Image (cartoon, rainbow, N blue to C red):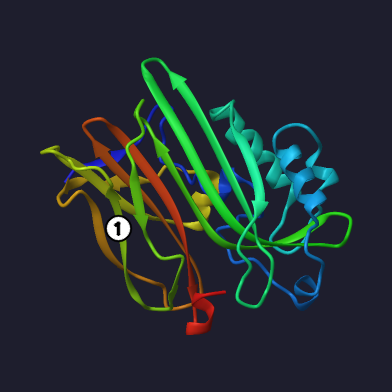
Amino acid sequence: MPRFRLGSWFRMRAWTTAVLALGASGLLPSPWTAAAAAAQTPTALQLQALERAFNGRGELSAVLEAGPGLDPTLVGLRRRSLLKDFPDAQWLVSPGTPLKDGTATTQIKVVGSRKQGSHTYAFEAVQLLALTSDGARINSQRVIKDQSLLHSAGVLLPVSLLIPDAVLTGQRYDVDVVFDDPLNGAVLAGGLSALTDAQVNTLASPSLQLGALGGGGLFKTVQAPLTPGNQTWAVLLVHPKGIVTATKRVRVVADQAGLTP
């Protein structure tokens, strides 16, 4: 089967936290100390200020300070990286669904597009974060969910990422990415690659082995690591009408309680 490395501008990059927003790699385990857990939940005004800063109407340094899982300098670098590729990128910061212990969460969504020659690209990424504040600035984060989609088609090809947010250590689980619309005889190709922490941190372009796909998408069974942490997948699907890439972060936990934080 051929190996395929996305070249030119359209690269299979670690589009998740590496470009989305908050953290010293949100794809790495974030320290979560008792002091951080006891800290305050960010206020609505702080979240509004964070959204304005992401969208260029304020300074991130006025909203963020370094703490567990959070490096404001890296946040700024990744924001600029995203804006370089998607100059019209817009962030939306909103309250998320509380965790089972009552911890408040924040959803950060970013969308952007780019036209290059005859090609149009559309990007969307979503994170669900548990943030804390010292009362003045946001000073820590824990990543609960993290995924992204990048389309090369002028008309978006709707796909579903059927990948769990969390799995047990050593568990075998399904990584499925499915086109929602009927294929009507179209032939697909695709590949799957596990991203290393280094690839995520450096926005590296991994090489994927492509193969013909059946059944309307990519269906793979994979195994989680034997130690808790994170596992990050990059998926490439080639459709006659365009290319879709997706990244998904899967939390790897040691017990059932950790599956639903």
Q: Is residue 22 visible?
A: no
Q: Is residue 113 above or below residue 193?
A: above
Is residue 44 left or right of 245 when viewed as pictured? right
Q: Is residue 244 above or below residue 252?
A: above
Residue shown at the point (52%, 75%) measured from the top left: 260
Q: State the residue position of label 1.
A: 176
Q: Is residue 171 above or below residue 4?
A: below
Image coords of residue 157 (percent x, y): 32, 37
| Residue at the farthest left position | 185
Is residue 57 left or right of 242 when viewed as pictured? right
Q: Is residue 18 visible?
A: yes
Residue shown at the point (48%, 25%) measured from the top left: 114
Is residue 217 left or right of 88 when viewed as pictured? left
Q: Which amino acid type is marked by label 1?
A: Asp
Image coords of residue 120 (percent x, y): 40, 24
The quadrant holding residue 75 is top right
The quadrant holding residue 8 is top left
Image coords of residue 128 (percent x, y): 59, 58
- Taking depth in this image into account, of 181 and 132 the one nearest to the observer is 181
Question: Please, what secondary structure does the residue beneath circle 1 have?
Answer: strand
Residue shown at the point (69%, 71%) measured from the top left: 103
Residue shown at the point (74%, 61%) measured from the top left: 140
